[in-house]
Image (spheres, grey):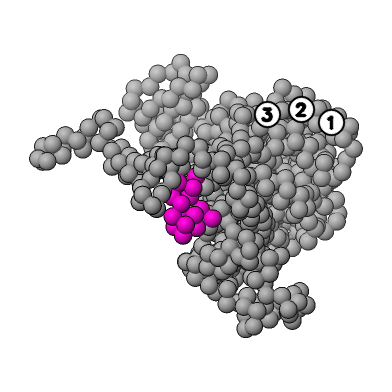
Amino acid sequence: MATVEYKGIGKSFGAVNILRDVSFRIEDRQFVVLLGPSGCGKTTLLRMTAGLESVSEGDLSINGKRVNDVHPRDRDIAMVFQNYALYPTMKVYENISFSLEVAKMPVAEIKQRVERAAEILNLTPYLQRYPKQLSGGQRQRVAMGRAMVREPSVFLFDEPLSNLDAKLRAHMRTEIRQLHNRLKTTTIYVTHDQVEAMTMADVIVVMRAGKIEQIGSPDDVYDRPASKYVADFIGASAINFLPGTAASGAGVPAVDTASGRILLEEGSGVKPGQRVVLGLRPTDVTVAADGAIGARAVLLERLGHDAQLFCEGPDGRFVAVVDKGLRFEEGSEVRFAIPPSKVHVFDAETEARI
Amino acid sequence: MSVAQVKRISISDSPIPWLLPLVSLLVVFTIYPLIYNIWLSFHEFVPRKRALQFVGVDNWVQLWNDARFWSSLGVTFAYFAIALAFELALGMAIALLLDAELPGFGALRAILSLTLVIPPAIAGMMFLLMEDPQFGALTYILNSLGLLDKSIPILATSSTALAGVLLAEIWQWTPFMVLIFLAGLRSLPTEPYEAAMIDGASSFQMFRRLTLPMMSRVIAVAVLLRGIDLFRVFDYVFVMTSGGPGTATYSLSLYAWQQTFSFIKWGYGATLSLVSLVIIMVLANIFIKVFKVRW
């Protein structure tokens, strides 16, 4: 069981800065997801935690002990790689037992641990096979078994599900989370998939271009995105952005956009005349004849349980999740009602939440 | 051939037009000489008659009773085994060292292949000079280091002659192993090594449990290529010792050459080279079976 702490972590390859001033703390037993697009430095941060990359600046501590210069084997961590990194010339059993063998653990105990891990991961029938004789999902589980048997104090996952098909990915997602609920080992999980982050994390760390954009629980990050970037990244269907200017005068704060006037909540902190960008999630708007904003229907995309309506408005594309029973004439005007509490307001300049 | 005929052949589905050139070369230069060689081993040239005469299995019986054949076979095996062991071990060690991305190593890797552009006979000459008992550089160094007694001429002493020849062989061909192993090492995936590092493996454990097994096919190819070449050793012994002193460095190829071209015993020479071919084929196939080499 362990905590992990990053203090002013920086990483550069030559003149290129990959990470700048990254500081946060991971508590014991937490499942933390590092989320961001490719190239944001999340994998580099994970590899630094593992000891596979050197730390250019700052202090990296595991369990309160500075580990900047500690060899990977002495950090008491286990890692699951994106391409699994199984040992191709060893059987599944040996792949899982290798670290224990190297640690000179008694054979009987190795056997017991490997068999237990194999049982948890449904790998028992495959112990005598070679990695190349396994499917992607099975290889993925071997990689997890290899990490598990060591009973490390921190698990590191580097996009472990990105090579699996959609169905298997959803299945493994729940398996990994259940495993964490059972083992309660501190876990750092890197992904670019916001669904994985939302469904698995206790805490999401959203990263952008080598810096932390927001740290919070999945609900925090979804309900109160710290910036336009986070709002855009999180959420199954892409959020709508409407640029506008805060209206002056009227009793409640409001923003005038090209599509119409949108009312905000009391005390939302916008100054009259301020240029802002509004974020509206497709799931938060409803079709209403007397709605605040209007757009022309372009396409209805049925998703099974509901449907996505694509519209073309004065502010560009506007998407809403609607009842799949509704019918729209292509090119007809549709009006949407917007609950003030669901409007995210960002400064047009800084893109930070207001 | 008319243009239309050429066109018809060039789009033909039949394999024959495509295989014919290569097959005819193979027949003329490999199959026919092999069959002729087998035929020859049951004949012998009779100088009196200036003709080949059928002798049945005489050549094979003679071979079985020929102490010089057995001695040359022993020399060939010793040469083959020692050279292969050294070239494999040194080749792997140097390849592992050169695999690092350090400044200047690219140039080192390039320099290494230089020994391979020297004709083996010339390399033999070089070592012949270097191992000269009076003014050879190598002799001088070995004498100074106390590794060799001043009174012992390396290539003219039966206990050291084979080692003297092997020096040239190993010097020239170890870089060949290095190049093959380097190519193999560079194609290995890096991720298993990172996983092993986290798993706590030492460098030696990684080498033994990861590098060697992953390199097994490359090593097998190197052993086969080099092994076949080593078994027919001729140039170094011919240039450096002519098989001497006595029969201390008389290899099978050299003996076959001597019987064929010096003694004009064409039938016996053919028999000796056939034996050499059979041994290589048997050894190679055993190796492929035992080490489960798959291509």
**Does the segment drawn in magenta span residue A177?**
no
Q: Residues within 10 Å of mark 2 (few under 14, many from 20)?
A: many
Question: In which chain is the residue bearing label 1?
Answer: A
Select label 2 or label 1 by which is in front: 1
Residue range of the region highlighted in magenta in the rendering: B255-271
User: Which percent across, then down, holds residue B55?
Assistant: 45, 40
Tell me the element at label 1.
Answer: helix
- Circle 3 residue: A129
Q: Nearer the viewer, residue A216 or B295?
A: B295
| Amino acid type, callout 3 | Arg
| Amino acid type, callout 2 | Ala
Residue placed furthest toward the front? B48
Q: Residues within 10 Å of mark 1 (few under 14, many from 20)?
A: some
| Amino acid type, callout 1 | Lys
| N-terminal label among 1 and 3 | 1
Quadrant in which the N terminus of chain B is drawn = top left
Q: Quadrant of residue B108?
A: bottom right
Disc 3 and disc 2 on one polypeptide chain: yes
